[in-house]
Image: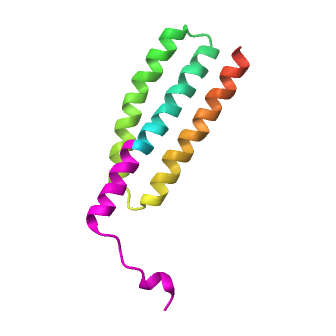
Amino acid sequence: MSYAAKLPSPTPRLRLAVRIGAAVFGGYAFTWGVIAAGAALLFKAGMDFHDAEFLASAVGLLVFLTVFLWTFATRRLLLAWVLLAGGGALLAGVASLVQASIV
């Protein structure tokens, strides 16, 4: 029997708290990346800045709702954290590169 098999399982309240944290904070990070990358790419494609910002923010609202609900529906909480935080960081990097190429 391995050491990992002897570890106590987290309480249901702790699992719920971690899932809520992933939904709120991970969802926020991912949505922020989507909005930043979307606005930068739309502006670079020729859309007016305020229109690009508004469209990206409107899509971001739907993205946040989707990832928030998905975080509660998925069985793999670690995968949710990795995808949300990592995806948000990747999208923020894309937005930064696009913005640097515009200026």
Q: Position of residue 103 (x, y in %)?
A: 71, 14
Q: Position of residue 45 (x, y in %)?
A: 63, 15
What scheme was used to colour the molecule?
Answer: rainbow
Q: Is residue 63 magenta?
A: no
Query: How many marks do you count on the picture?
Result: 0
Query: Looking at the image, which is closer to me, 81 or 63?
Result: 81
Residue under the point 67% across and 24% down: 98
Q: Is residue 55 left or right of residue 20?
A: right
Q: Is residue 91 left or right of residue 26?
A: right
Residue under the point 66% across and 21% down: 99
Q: Which residue occupies the extreme left position in the image?
A: 13
Q: Is residue 60 left or right of residue 88?
A: left
Per the picture, the main secondary structure of the magenta-coloured stretch is: helix
Residue under the point 59% across and 33% down: 92
Q: Quadrant of residue 59?
A: top left
Q: Position of residue 33 (x, y in %)?
A: 53, 33
Q: Is residue 20 left or right of residue 29?
A: left
Q: Is residue 43 above or below residue 97?
A: above
Q: Is residue 93 above or below residue 46?
A: below
Q: Is residue 15 magenta?
A: yes
Q: Which residue occupies the extreme top position in the image?
A: 48
Q: Position of residue 4 (x, y in %)?
A: 48, 81
Residue under the point 59% across and 21% down: 40
Which residues lie in the magenta part? 1-24
Query: Looking at the image, which is closer to me, 86 or 58?
Result: 86
Q: Is residue 26 above or below residue 63?
A: below
Query: Looking at the image, which is closer to me, 50 or 15?
Result: 15
Q: Which residue occupies the extreme bottom position in the image?
A: 1
